[in-house]
Structures are given as structure tokens and as C-alpha cells.
Amino acid sequence: PADTEMSIELIRNQVNPDDMENVVIRSYYEALTAGNYAYEARITWPDDSQHWIRVKGVVLSDEKKNPYRMLGTVVDITESKRDEIRKNDFIAMASHELKTPLTSLKAYIQLLESKLPASSDPFIATALSKASNQVSKMTALVHSFLDLSKLEPGKLQLKKQAFDINKLVEEMIAESRAIFNTHMLQFKVTEPIMVSADKEKIGQVISNFISNAIKYSPKGSSVEITASVANSEAEVSVSDCGVGIRAKDREKIFQRFYRANEAAVKHVAGFGIGLYLSSEIIQRHKGRIGVESSEGKGSRFYFRLPLA
């Protein structure tokens, strides 16, 4: 009711605990330096029904740059959010159903390749190899859509373990070489760098960085992957000599479904979900992700994780 007196503690108690920790508090601390905040969160009404709100605003600071007030709006977006959840559920269901026929198709192609005599028509061997690569790409795309549906708060579960990031990078490079043989992937192994994270999810991020570097750089060029330690954090970076990213696109490159609208990259297939998924995975690990790029001079994508 409009005449209800509410304290900040009472309001915060109505926010979903998972959203409070992973969304609200993170946005708050970012706002202290960036000057503005924006997030979506789940709240519970007194009748125990779940609703969604979108919060946007600015942080006001005095002459000494000390913040003293947050000014903004809170909008109920429950209906639109429920539509989005239904859409994500459909994507997850469709993607899950696609996994089985793709797995069977991959198995049959591998079986044909193993039974194909070395003296057979070279065209058949090449066609089967290309078909296998396309099935692998389709499988990766299906898994991306499944992961996208899991990003709804509470669904993405991290299975953390301690591992050497160098060895994971080597595994992802080996997988990339099996699919792409058009670029030189350079990586120099350093001393073991131990992190505590979800190995499979971090592998997805590295694989996505590498595949993007290959897709957006000329055939035959080099892609440099590095793993290092700086300020008690492990950093993995992937650098290419490709088309680069314009300043206005760099600000949005990690948004869901965002793709740069320019002639140089229109021929590259994709849905704009790989970097968004990578960003969400790294943020759920309380890490940082970013890009350094100049148009026409290549890009360097990197992420940082706390050391184990």
C-alpha cells in the first residue's frame, strides 16, 4: 500500500538472496566508480509471489567526489520477464532435443571415416572431414543455447575445482586445431598457475576467445594465447591480427545478441551469444573480463580470475 513505511533493510529483505549477492551488491560497487547503476532482480511480495524489477539510476557525489545519494527509478517488469523465461525454456527444450540426433550424426560420420580405405576417392574423405567439422560447430552452438537458458539466476551451477590454467589452455588449443587448421596458434607454457574454478565453463570462455580470433582474422595469420599472473590474479589473453573493434562496439561487445554492424564482419556467422556467455561465466567466478582493440589492428580479449 502507498502509505506503508519501509526501511532500506525491509526492502533488501524482499530481494532474492542470490540476486542480492551476485547482482545488486556488484552493481552497487560498480556504481561507486562508474557513477550510474542498472540491474534486474527478483523480489518476493508479501503474498510470497515472485516478481521482477528493473532498477536504473545515478550516484550523486559532492565536490570532493564523495557519494552521498543514489537517485533512480524502479520499474516492475514481471510480465515481460515471464515472457523471456518462457522463451528461454523453449530454447533449452529445443536445444536439448537437438543434441541426440547431432551426437548420432557425428558417430556415423566417424564410423564412415574409420571404414574408408586410404585408397578411396579423396573427395569423399574431404567431404566427410568437412561434414564432421560442421557437426562439431552445430553441437557447440546447441550447447551455447543451453548455457544461455541456464543463465537465469539460480540455474547456472559452478562445479569448482583446483587446476592449472596452462593445461586447460593447451587442451582448448588442441580442440581448436582439430576444427580449424587455417591459423597458427601460439602458446608458451609457463610455471603452473593454479585457480579454483569450474574447469568446463572456463574452457568454454577460452575456446570462445580462440574461435573468435580465428573467425575475425585473415587465414594464415597468428593467434597468440598467453597465461600469466598479475596482482594475485591469473590472466588469460587471446590476441589476433584481425579487423579490430570500433570504440562504439567495444562498449556493447559483451551484451547478449549484440553483433557489430559493419561490412568487414557481416560475412562471419554467429548469434552474438558467445561473448555474453563468457562475460557471465567470468563474473559468476568473481573475475574480470575485457577487450583491448583498435579498428583494423586486431584485438586482445582477456579475463582474470583469483588465484587458488
Image (cartoon, grey):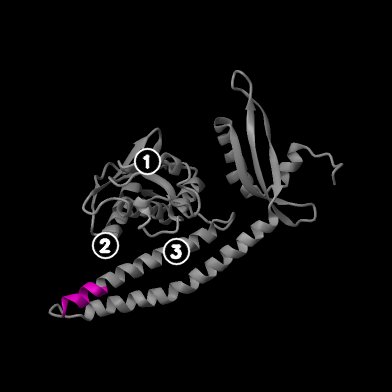
Furthest-left residue in view? 119
As shown in the figure, which amino acid type bears the numbered disc 2?
A: Ala
Whether label 1 touches label 2, CB < 8 Å: no
Tell me the crowding category of disc 3: few under 14, some 14 to 19, or many 20 or more residues within 10 angstroms, Cα based: some
Where residue 27 sits, quadrant-wise, is top right
Confirm whether residue 189 shows in the render.
Answer: yes
Find residue 280 and report its horizontal and vertical position in percent.
50, 50
Q: Is residue 193 visible?
A: no
- Please give the name of the residue rendered at 38% of the width and 77% of the height, measured from the top-left corner: 104
Magenta stretch secondary structure, dominant: helix
Residue indicated by mark 2 = 178
Count of numbered marks: 3
* For residue 226, side relative to residue 31 (left or right): left
> Is tag 1's residue or tag 2's residue first in the polypeptide sequence?
2
Q: Nearer the viewer, residue 301 or 43?
A: 301
Secondary structure beneath dot 3 equals helix
Specify which label sits upstream in the sequence, 1 or 3. Answer: 3
Region rendered in magenta: 121-128
Q: Residue at x 64, y 28 (%)?
A: 60
Instruction: Give the residue number, with chain letter if any, for mark 3.
Output: 143
Q: Is residue 41 above or below residue 73?
A: below
Residue 229 picture location, percent across and down: 35, 37
Q: Is residue 57 left or right of residue 296?
A: right
Disc 1 designates what residue? 235
State which quadrant residue 74 falls in.
top right
> Is 34 drawn above or below residue 133 in the view shown?
above
Residue 243 image point, x, y percent = 32, 46
Which amino acid, mark 1? Glu
Identify the amino acid type marked 3: His
Q: Is residue 125 magenta?
A: yes
Q: Nearer the viewer, residue 139 or 304?
A: 139
Question: Is label 2 in a helix, a strand or a loop?
Answer: helix
